[in-house]
Image (spheres, helix red, strand yellow):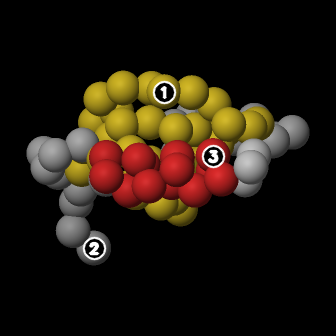
Amino acid sequence: MSDFKFEIVKELGVLSESKSGWKRELNLVSWNGAAAKYEIRDWSPGQKMGKGVSLTAEEVTELKKLLEKMDE
């Protein structure tokens, strides 16, 4: 398995926290020096990461529009 590097460019917020201390967070993350993307991912107290989903700024905009429709 090849090494990878990541940098949390901006911590945007915690969506939830489990009893074991894992937090589901929304962050802006750069992987291997690439342009940062928005990520929803679980993180352990020791900064181990779980699986997540990455979104571009355009995808976040579309997601926001879809979520706003839920209130209509």
Q: Quadrant of the N terminus?
A: bottom left
Give 32 or 55, whichever is nearer the viewer. Answer: 55
Residue type of the residue flagged with mark 2: Met
Give the Cα separation between the discs numbered 3 and 2: 40 Å
Residue in the image at 47% along x and 60% along y: 53
Q: Tell me where residue 29 sits by quadrant.
A: top left
Give 8 or 55, whichever is nearer the viewer. Answer: 55
Measured as percent of width and height from the top left, residue 63 is found at: 51, 54
Counting other residues with Cα less than 10 Å from the Cα at mark 2, is it few (<14), some (14-19), or many (20 or more)?
few
Residue that sits furthest to the front in the current view: 72
- Report which residue position mark 2 lands on: 1
Local secondary structure at mark 1: strand
Work out whether 60 lies above or below 45. Answer: below
Give 10 or 18, whichever is nearer the viewer. Answer: 10
Residue type of the residue flagged with mark 1: Leu
Dots 1, 2 in contact, CB < 8 A:
no
Counting other residues with Cα less than 10 Å from the Cα at mark 3, is it few (<14), some (14-19), or many (20 or more)?
few
Is 9 on the left-hand or right-hand side of 38?
A: left
- Report which residue position mark 1 lands on: 12
- Report which residue position mark 3 lands on: 68
Residue type of the residue flagged with mark 3: Glu
Counting other residues with Cα less than 10 Å from the Cα at mark 1, is it few (<14), some (14-19), or many (20 or more)?
few
